[in-house]
Image (tube, rainbow, N blue to C red):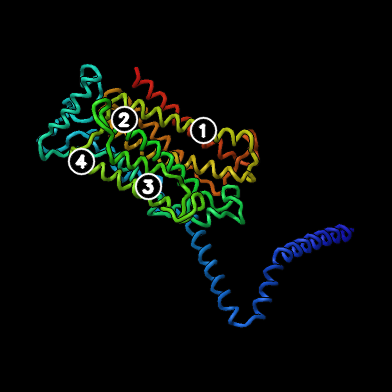
Amino acid sequence: MFDPIVAFFQRGFTAIGRGIGLAVAWLLWPFVALGNWYRARSWIIKGPIGLVLLGLILFYGYFIWQTQAWTNFNPDYVDRYKVAERKVPAGSPVSGPGTTTPGQPNVGATGDRAAAGGSSGEADTTEALAMAQLPAGTVCQTSAIVDVAADLIDFNVNQNAWISSMLLYKLGLFGLDWDDTPWLDNKASFQRGINQAIRRTSVELVDSLGRVRGTSGINNDLQSARGNIQFDEETWYFGVNPFGPKTPTPSFYRAAMRDFRKFNVSLGKCEAIFDGRSDNMVEFLDRIANDLGNTSAIIRERSEFHNGGWFDTRADDRFWFAFGQLYGYYGILSAAGADFENVVAQRGLTPIWTETIRQLRAALNIQPLIISNGREDGWIMPTHLATMGFYILRVRSNLVEMRDILAR
């Protein structure tokens, strides 16, 4: 009774197996033909070809390893900075003859303009003179923001290889950009997201935080760091536009890291300025909120118009860029809470600041093995992009609220 049904399924599975076998044979026949040709040649020909093939295998093996091994990746990396133990704002004396006691107004390079008293111009002048007149031997608090920025660069280009400028990444998969494939591009997108957070921070350090507005020049170390970190992300040792040898991207980023560390050394000697006033903090938060808003818009566009589930090959690029950006801002904003400690405390921002940091950390728990850009009302494929966008909007909303509180 059931024999015809069983025979039907047997024929079906046999046909499927035969089809798979033919497809595999069709894909492998060029390699089989080359193998047969290679075995028939003498060692004079086999030797050089074998060495070239071995070199290619090692070359690709190293590239694949670097794209998959995320050395020292740690969502809790902020813990090592012990920002909660910093009780003095960046740029203020912490030891020596110029040290202030708790409760006294800050006469260093930080402090709320309203606490300093007088007009903005008078406050700037007072702070600049105070920095110039600190007694010899005074030690000032370094900037946690600068520490984190330098360490994130170190993580990107020293502890890990900078993927975007590696030769095989630039060549792509048979000429197809790796970003257009589902493979080997997640780490590159993650690194670029971190780099975006560092770039935004470097601009604010140069324009406002690292100088007393209106009364001091731009800090040379921060200026150099900003120029180096803004360098393009894809330069290898050689290029065609213009044609010739070049300095690769990681070298510029390492120079930026050294510039940041040099600034903090000067700040620790009270020879540089960190102007941590509330209006500077407003501007800093506003710029970060705008940066996250731009990323949110990119994610929304991808999620709304290209929701192909697991088959959207660009969803992983968007996801890991946003993840890297939040990874970077998690450290930078945690550090900002210490550098602007007096402003956060005086303006009652501690609860919302703590919640913002908690949300940033929660976003880093989203680490799916495969990124899916499913429909928001779908029930088969997840929608990881929409989930990441939700966290970005929560963080941005808190930043905007804190900015509004400070601007009152």
Neighbor class of circle 4 (other Cα within 10 Å; few <14, some 14-19, many 20+) is: many
Query: Where, by quadrant of the figure, is residue 357 drawn?
Result: top left
Residue at x-position 53% and y-position 46%: 368
Q: Nearer the viewer, mark 2 or mark 4?
A: 2
Q: Answer above or below: position of 297 versus 259.
A: above
Q: Is residue 121 left or right of residue 27?
A: left
Q: What amino acid is found at the position of numbered circle 1 in the picture?
A: Ser
> What residue would you read off at disc 1?
296
Q: Earlier in the sequence, mark 3 or mark 4?
A: 3
Label 2 and label 4: CA atoms lie apart by 19 Å
Label 3 and label 2: CA atoms lie apart by 21 Å
Query: Where, by quadrant of the figure, is residue 274 drawn?
Result: top left
**Which mark, residue 208?**
2
Asked if the residues shown at circle 3 and circle 1 are in contact, with their CB atoms under 8 angstroms apart, the answer is no
Q: Earlier in the sequence, mark 4 or mark 1?
A: 4
Q: Is residue 5 left or right of residue 126?
A: right
Q: Earlier in the sequence, mark 3 or mark 2?
A: 3
Q: What amino acid is found at the position of numbered circle 4 in the picture?
A: Gly
